[in-house]
Amino acid sequence: MRRQNEWYCQKRRELVKQFGGRCRYCEIKEGSVRYSARKKDLVDIVLEFAHKANKRISGMNRGRNARVAEVIRNPGDFLLLCRRCHNRYDHDHPLTDEEIKAMNEEVPF
Ligand SMILES: [Zn+2]
């Protein structure tokens, strides 16, 4: 279990770096803090990998290691987002194909 955890942490760090280390939408950096009106406190920013197509599938259901392995295999299928933008992306304002295409062209790999 501990070894798996180390693998996850290391791979996740590498991927966050590969994706630029910032939320694709609001550009907040991994490891920075933001004021949460809901929590009435500062929260640490931990970026997440949002799947562009399977929006309703949570990474939690399949385990985070499987999620990271999937990002490694198909980085173009994911966006690096903060939790706030991830929620927005998945539920409130689904992106159009054009917007996703534009992102694909902008994100360097
Ligand atoms: Zn964001």
Image (tube, rainbow, N blue to C red):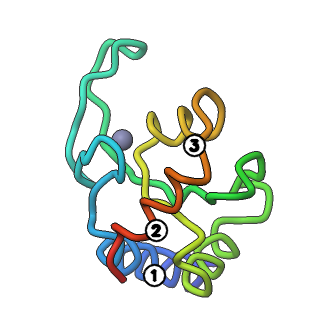
Q: Position of residue 44 (x, y in %)?
A: 30, 41
Image point (25%, 23%), residue name: 35
Mark before the other along the chain sequence, 3 or 1: 1
Question: Left or right: 40 with respect to 5?
Answer: left
Q: Nearer the viewer, mark 1 or mark 2?
A: 2
Q: Position of residue 77 (x, y in %)?
A: 60, 70
List the residue tagged with mark 2: 104
Cα gap from disc 3 to disc 1, whole angstroms: 27 Å
Label 2: few (<14), some (14–19) or many (≥20) C-alpha neighbours in 10 Å:
some
- In terms of depth relative to the viewer, which is nearer, 7 or 1? 7
| Disc 3 Cβ-to-ligand 1 distance below 8 Å | no
Image point (29%, 41%), residue name: 26
Label 3: few (<14), some (14–19) or many (≥20) C-alpha neighbours in 10 Å:
few
Q: Quadrant of the C terminus?
A: bottom left
Q: Amino acid at mark 1?
A: Lys
List the residue tagged with mark 1: 11
Q: Position of residue 79 (x, y in %)?
A: 48, 60
- In terms of depth relative to the viewer, which is nearer, 32 or 23? 23
Q: Quadrant of the N terminus?
A: bottom right
Q: Which mark is residue 95?
A: 3
Image point (41%, 81%), residue name: 10
Q: Secondary structure at mark 1?
A: helix
- In terms of depth relative to the viewer, which is nearer, 50 or 35? 50
Q: Nearer the viewer, mark 3 or mark 1?
A: 3
Q: Amino acid at mark 2?
A: Asn
| Disc 2 Cβ-to-ligand 1 distance below 8 Å | no
| Disc 1 Cβ-to-ligand 1 distance below 8 Å | no
Cα gap from disc 2 to disc 3, whole angstroms: 13 Å
